[in-house]
Image: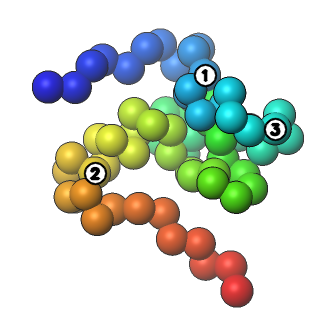
Amino acid sequence: MTTAAPPVSEPDPSTMHCAGSQIGLCAGCQRQTWRYGPGGLPLCTWCMTDQQARWGSAVRFKSTRP
């Protein structure tokens, strides 16, 4: 059982571990999350958890940069 996500107005906890210039909006719910730079993902913690539950634990973001 997963805990319910807080309102979208609350930022993702990952924003506490990155610089302000690396914060962007989640591609799924538009919540502020660590989106740019090393360690950033296009989805917030809750959206990524939902996708992993749907597609399996092997789901992850793969950078397409050379």
Closer to us: 6 or 29: 6
- Alpha carbon separation for disc pair 2 and 3: 26 Å
Task: Answer with left or right where residue 40 lies relative to residue 51.
Answer: right
Task: Answer with left or right where residue 1 lies relative to residue 40.
Answer: left
Q: Position of residue 14 (x, y in %)?
A: 59, 34
Q: Amino acid at mark 3?
A: Ala
Closer to us: 52 or 25: 52
Q: Is residue 16 visible?
A: yes
- Alpha carbon separation for disc pair 3 and 1: 14 Å
Residue for point 83% across, 34% down? 20
- Alpha carbon separation for disc pair 2 and 1: 20 Å
Closer to us: 25 or 48: 48
Q: Secondary structure at mark 3?
A: loop
Residue 12: quadrant of the picture = top right
Earlier in the chain: of badge 3 and badge 1, it is 1
Mark 2 neighbour density, 10 Å: few (under 14) some (14–19) many (20 or more): some
Tag 2 residue: 52
For the C terminus, the image quarter is: bottom right
Q: Residue furthest bottom?
A: 66
Tag 3 residue: 19
For the N terminus, the image quarter is: top left
Tag 1 residue: 11
